[in-house]
Amino acid sequence: MTKDLKFRIKIAAEPEDVYTALTRPLAIELWTGYPAKMSTEPGSEFELWDGDICGKNIEFEENFKIVQEWYFGNQDKPSIVTMKLFKQGTKTQIEVNHTNIPIDDFDDIKEGWLENYFSAVKDFVEVK
């Protein structure tokens, strides 16, 4: 069994800065503290947090959209993450849609997105 997760988060930064933080290896290394493997080339593989998050890059629209397939063992269907960035005044709203999360991993994934992933991105890019 699987579940889907959809949420929105606002970050006090420009979409370009958020997109850079999510797609450039050096920027990712700065906010995660770990080596990162990332490319905006569709079909390329990525790896974050020392391999805790890994998968394949599917689609990119610069400063607007990121689509990735996340790996979770032996799934029948891929787990797809779509992040859309929208400018809202002086902030960027990010809409995250993560589909086909294995039920056993759902709570950890939800917590990871909010308490680790985007918390670290916010600390890295937010205008203070």
Image (cartoon, rainbow, N blue to C red):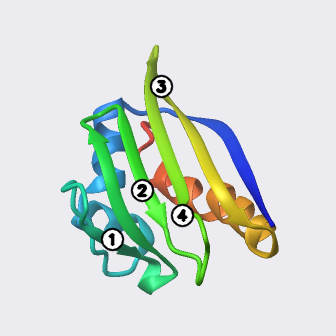
Dot 4 or dot 1: first in sequence order is 1
Q: SS at mark 1?
A: strand
Q: Amino acid at mark 3?
A: Lys
* CB contact under 8 Å: marks 3 and 4: no
Image height check: is 28 above or below 22? below
Query: Distance of mark 3 from mark 4, alpha carbons?
Result: 31 Å
Residue identifier under label 4: 78
Foreground mark, 2 or 3, reads 2
Picture quadrant of residue 126? top left
Q: Amino acid at mark 1?
A: Phe
Foreground mark, 3 or 1, reads 1
Towards the viewer: 128 or 96 = 96
Q: SS at mark 2?
A: strand
Q: SS at mark 4?
A: loop
Dot 3 or dot 1: first in sequence order is 1
Residue identifier under label 1: 46
Picture quadrant of residue 113? bottom right
Residue shown at the point (38%, 80%) measured from the top left: 34
**What percent of the width, then of the height, locates residue 14?**
35, 30
Dot 3 or dot 4: first in sequence order is 4
Residue shown at the point (33%, 53%) measured from the top left: 58
**What percent of the width, then of the height, locates residue 13?**
41, 33
Residues packed near mark 2 inside 10 Å, few (<14), some (14 to 19) or many (20 plus): many
